[in-house]
Amino acid sequence: MGVKEFIENAKSGSIDIVEHTHRVLDESKKLAKEYNYFNTVSEELALELANNIKKSIKSKDSRIKNKKLFGLPISIKDSICVKGVESTAGSRILKGYRPLFNATVVERAINEGAIIIGKTSQDEFGFGSFSVNIGLGFKTPKNPVDPERSCGGSSGGAAGLAKKASFPHIAIGESTGGSIAEPASFCDIFGLTPTYGRNSRYGNIDFGNSLDKLGTLGKTCYDVALLEEVIAGHDINDSTTINAPVDRYSDLNKKNAKKMRIAVIKESFTEGLGPAVEKKVWGGIKKLESEGIKYEEISLEMPIRYGLAAYYMIGTSEASTNLAKFCGMRYGNESELEGNFNQYFTKIRSSHFSEEAKRRIILGTFARMSGYRDAYYIKAMQIRALMTREYKKAFKKYDALVSPTVPILPPKFTEIAKLTPLQNYMMDVMLVGPNVCGLPHLNVPVGYEKALPVGMLLTGDHLQEKKLLELGNLFEVEDV
Ligand code: GLN
């Protein structure tokens, strides 16, 4: 049963939410064991929320019937705080941390009747593209289509679960440089990263504050739209949220899509692109054409050529600042105080951060150092402005830009182990542009090649997520 049908049935009273939640939790625990999709299954909270809904139905509280997510299981990426539930961002340094508050997106989902089923696995603090850069004691999620391959990352657990779960479900993930669209592409689902500031970051364990965006992953375009509609909007707890009305994203109209104009980004079809991906993405473009949508090919040089360099400068600079607080005193796991403070902080940070976190702390600190700041950090910010200008020019003429989401098919873990850090970073070549410029983007599954899923990326102008959803809604996911 899909999300829409489930909510209708649940509202009509034909599903017992508590019984259903028990079944969902059983399957979730199984998936946690076999596929590593969860860092924590939040059994107690899920049952409490389900019982609350059951009670309001019994009390004939009429408001309950208007709840948009009535009894629907929702998972939360581990970097997003859920009150009373261990929230670690996949890092050993936060093991045992139970937030005293809900992130705004979690609070809003609960207020609309969501059942929070757990915290999904990810790369530590979001640092990665394959969910293999994990803290000590955490597990890597496996691709639902082929468990020897990666789910992508960093919202890997969210994407794997969204595809594999037999129960109706939508996931909340996070993207700094592609971490929603990339795993969505590897797992054959839709993944919406909205405009920077559309969704509150309050309660998100920061990676890069000028880049982080919370978003949604699900099996259909309607699913991601529905959850986005619930969580979006201004929040007094996050002054970077945009104070603009929230569109009715789930009200998707096929006729609107047919009037749109799109542009294919030429540079995204050049070297490094796997032939299987190229073929399927063109198939997606032709599908849009067959719906009456006109396309043109355009050149968008800055984002593809300089996007990665700018992203890794800005991202690591902000990450190194954010991680400075995790020193085993007030923030992060504490241990026996030995030696002087510097020795103590060094001991904690050395033993609690993974290799990748350390690499990013070193890179980011270097880029911000006096003498290098102008050459790296400031330069990256200038490139960001130029990239945004180029995108904005394109959006004067087109409703959406099209490219592949990821240049390759989901790789095997044995192949990932051979990649250098730079090759890892290259994975996001198509995704860093929209992320650095805060533009909404949507992964649309365009079918299978060699029995593996391929995704197509639609990028839109600021606050135009509705257009992307209406285009994406023309696609249905084929199950293989
Ligand atoms: N793969 C990118 C990185 O490693 C993006 C991560 C993210 O969006 N959280 O930085």
Image: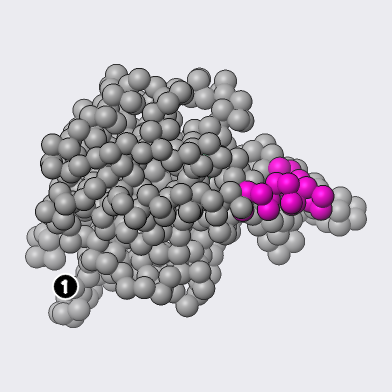
Depth check, front residue: 180 or 351: 180
Q: Quadrant of residue 299?
A: top left
| Horizontal relation, residue 35 to residue 211: left or right | left
Q: Which residues are magenta?
A: 362-381
Q: Quadrant of residue 340?
A: bottom right
Q: Against 120, is 111 above or below?
A: below
Please report the residue visible at 28 percent of the width from the left and 24 percent of the height from the top.
279
**x, y percent for residue 20:** 22, 54
Residue 371 in magenta? yes
| Horizontal relation, residue 245 to residue 166: left or right | right
The quarter in which the C terminus is drawn is top left
Residue 398 in magenta? no
Mark 1 crowd level (few <14, some 14–19, many ≥20, 10 Å Cα): some
Depth check, front residue: 209 or 265: 265
Give the residue at mark 1: 65
Q: Is residue 9 visible?
A: yes
Q: Against 334, is 411 above or below?
A: above
Q: Main secondary structure of the magenta part?
A: helix
Amino acid identity at mark 1: Lys
Please report the residue visible at 67 percent of the width from the left and 43 percent of the height from the top.
360
Q: Is mark 1 within 8 Å of ligand 1?
A: no
**x, y percent for residue 218:** 29, 48
Q: Against 79, is 99 above or below?
A: below
**x, y percent for residue 41:** 41, 51
SS class of the residue under badge 1? helix
Please report the residue visible at 44 percent of the width from the left and 74 percent of the height from the top.
235
Please report the residue visible at 23 percent of the width from the left and 66 percent of the height from the top.
248
Depth check, front residue: 69 or 55: 69
